Image (cartoon, helix red, strand yellow):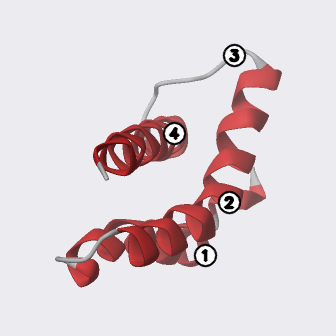
Amino acid sequence: MESTKQLNHILNGLYICMALLSMFDILTNFEIRSQGLKSFIYYGVLFATPLVLIWNFISLKNNKVLASLSPLLILILVFTMGLTKS
């Protein structure tokens, strides 16, 4: 049970870092110059969203709605703002 909790923190932390970097790259003057890193971040956000959403819903016994809120909000942001077009 403790390893599941640690894995949950690591997975959510990496996901939030990737999402923040992609938003900084699109919405501000912050620029990721490495094309490989930029592709990794964008595809990571796209593929990790369902993974984190499912993992949070299955692994957590309490606060399922709260834990599933951040991946859903980021997924909505990706599709509404068109972050995949750049």
Circle 2/circle 3 CB separation < 8 Å = no
Quarter of image, res 32: top right
In space, the residues marked 1 and 2 are separated at their CA atoms by 10 Å
Q: Which residue is mark 4?
A: 18
Mark with earlier residue (3, 4): 4
Q: Which mark is residue 33?
A: 3
What residue lies at 40% left-to-right and 37% top-to-bottom?
10
In space, the residues marked 3 and 4 are separated at their CA atoms by 15 Å
Query: How many marks overall?
Result: 4
Left-right relation of 2 to 76? left
Instruction: Residue 34 in the image: state x and y as whole percent.
Output: 74, 16
Kind of residue at badge 2 = Leu
- Between 81 and 5, the one lying in front of the other is 5
Mark with earlier residue (4, 2): 4
Q: Which mark is residue 79?
A: 1
In space, the residues marked 4 and 2 are separated at their CA atoms by 10 Å
Mark with earlier residue (1, 3): 3
Left-right relation of 86 to 7? right
Quarter of image, res 83: bottom right
What residue lies at 43% left-to-right and 67% top-to-bottom?
71
Kind of residue at badge 4 = Met
Kind of residue at badge 1 = Phe
- Between 84 and 36, the one lying in front of the other is 36
Instruction: Residue 35 in the image: state x and y as whole percent.
Output: 80, 23
Left-right relation of 61 to 56? left
Q: Which mark is residue 46?
A: 2
Q: Residue furthest top?
A: 34
